[in-house]
Image: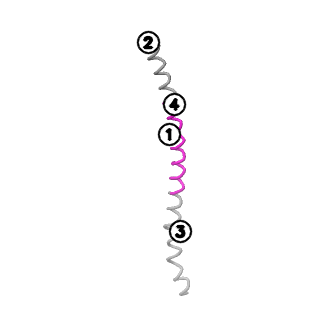
Amino acid sequence: MHSIIGFLPIYFLIFYIGIPVAIVYFFYKKYERLAKKRNIELEKQTEALERIASIMERST
């Protein structure tokens, strides 16, 4: 019985603290990857729009 009581703090740390932290970390990393992809796409779009704007300026 005493050995079960000794392991309770470990179970508490794993199930009530560790698992929610792991879930939050997983979704944070997933969002971080998506944000990085979005930033790369926005940089490409901005570069293309700047080229178009410079061509329009030269043509007028």
Q: Does the magenta stretch include residue 43?
A: yes
Residue lying at 53% horizontally and 70% vertically, measured from the top left: 14
Disc 3 to disc 2: CB gap under 8 Å: no
Residue 45 marker: 4
Mark 2 vs 1, N-terminal side: 1
Circle 1 SS class: helix
The quarter in which the N terminus is drawn is bottom right
Circle 4 SS class: helix
The residue segment tinted magenta is 25-47
Q: How far apart are marks 3 and 1 (CA)?
A: 36 Å
Q: Whole-percent x and y of residue 55?
A: 49, 18
Give the number of the mark in front: 4 or 2: 2
Most frequent secondary structure within the magenta stretch: helix
Residue 60 marker: 2
Q: Which amino acid does label 2 sit on?
A: Thr
Disc 3 to disc 1: CB gap under 8 Å: no
Circle 2 SS class: loop
Give the number of the mark in front: 4 or 3: 4
Q: What residue type is labelled 3?
A: Phe
